[in-house]
Amino acid sequence: MIVGVLAFLVYSVFSWLQWKSFTIRSWDLGIFTQLAKDYAHFQAPIVSIKGHGYNLLGDHFHPLLVLLGPFYRLFPSAYTLLVVQNLLLAVSVVVIAHFAIKRLGSITGACLGAAYALSWGLQSAIDSQFHEVAFAVPLLALSLVALLDEKWRSAWIWAALLVFVKEDLGLTVFMIGLVFAWRARTASGLCLASWGVLWFILATKVILPAMNPGDQWAYESQLNIGALMSNPGSLFQADKVTTMILLVFITAGLCLFSPLALLVLPTLAWRFLSDLPVYWGQEWQYSAVLMPIVFCAAIDALHRRKVLNSERLRLLLGTTILLISLLLTSQYAFGKLNDIDKNFALTTVESSRNALSTVPEGVTVETDISLMSYLVDRTEVYWVGNSNNPAPEYVLMDVSGRTDAAPNVIAAETMQRFPGTQYVTVFADAHYQVAKKQ
């Protein structure tokens, strides 16, 4: 419990520093805030950031995110989602640390729990801000710990819920079911495997195409098996190899000595089959679901392998794994905490607040990602990159990196995008411009 509480505090400090310095990593936080806002008012998740009238249930299959609704209703802010994610990840830390201590002793278990809490996959997820996989991480931890404890019913239930977090996790559930069947020697494991495959097919072939504006699973084209077959060497691209090495390295290789390690294969498969390099490396949230797997595999190996029965050897391996996580921390998100003034600079805070204060409550706004997450709670937000946006009442854009940032450039560009409309600049400084529809 102590390890989990400390993890939650570290995660929360990091998120608060991001929030108060107006550090927004992507449009995901804004997207999921719009979803939570609709669920809080018992409405379908129509997310205008993705497109006019876009139902987010046609993007990824994540009905379990309806649980965000009550939290957002109580605390209507995008920041609420960051707190919820930190809490969910911290719950997984409690589950894994408690299990490690029970199996391996207080010191070794605490070392593994702390190493998991600081693992690069969780760090990258927190740095990326909210994503649906935040719900998958504790579910995986609960399921795998129950599986290793031979609490078959609990393992089955926790794993079964994963299919409602994201469609590809149905394949992970399939793998869990196979390991379940092998260890429990019961048909219920095969039933779990079938459940995972069934929901993967239903989600990708029926539900998502029915809800998606393009009448298809939006990410099917990224599973480029043909490209891999024609060029098998692409599997050994630098980012892919580095990710695989780090998954092993973070547990000092112990994860390889447990069949649970096989559970990483579905996630790595869809990532490495894609031709988008962003999926291959260690940034963003894509590796978060792999962290409970490799650490539970490592705990399983330490507990079951007779050659590791020595308490001193276990302690040495536990402290080594913790040192590895601490070493890697300097290369990932939490390394930014070493220089808060530089990495969470407050230089744009006054400008950001002034620009936001120019936009009244309840209006429609077209914007980039810069202040998107600070607008979604009180306005209807559209992303500037969409082609089907209606003419917004306000436009707010970051111009700090532009060389052509004349005081009325945003108003002029907006009038070009929406012929027949008139916009006037109502705020302009070196960082932002706000234009209002006349």
Image: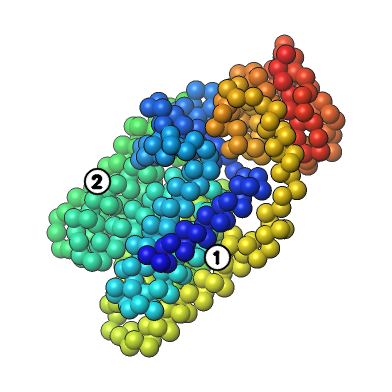
Q: Secondary structure at mark 1?
A: helix
Q: Amino acid at mark 1?
A: Thr
Q: Give x and y (percent) for residue 46.
A: 47, 27
Residue situated in front as seen by the camera: 214 or 351: 351
> If the image is split into quadrants, where does the N terminus sit?
bottom left
Residue situated in front as seen by the camera: 216 or 80: 80
Q: Does label 2 or label 1 sit earlier along the sequence?
A: 2
Q: Secondary structure at mark 2?
A: helix
Left or right relative to 370: residue 10: left
Q: Residue at x 45, y 47 (%)?
A: 84
| Above or below, comparing residue 438 to residue 53 in the picture | above
| Above or below, comparing residue 189 to residue 418 in the picture | below
Residue situated in front as seen by the camera: 383 or 2: 2
| Above or below, comparing residue 135 to residue 435 in the picture | below
Q: Residue at x 82, y 25 (%)?
A: 408
Q: Give x and y (percent) for residue 361.
A: 60, 25
> If the image is split into quadrants, where does the C terminus sit?
top right
Q: Amino acid at mark 2?
A: Trp
Whether residue 288 appears in this view of the structure is yes
Left or right relative to 13: residue 167: left
Q: Residue at x 54, y 23 (%)?
A: 52
Q: Give x and y (percent) for residue 267.
A: 42, 54
Give me the C-alpha separation between circle 2 and circle 1. 33 Å
Q: Give x and y (percent) for residue 283.
A: 56, 56
Residue with the mark numbered 2: 195
Residue with the mark numbered 1: 242
- Tell me whether circle 2 and circle 1 mark residues in contact (CB < 8 Å): no
Q: Quadrant of residue 163?
A: top left
Residue 337: numbered disc: none
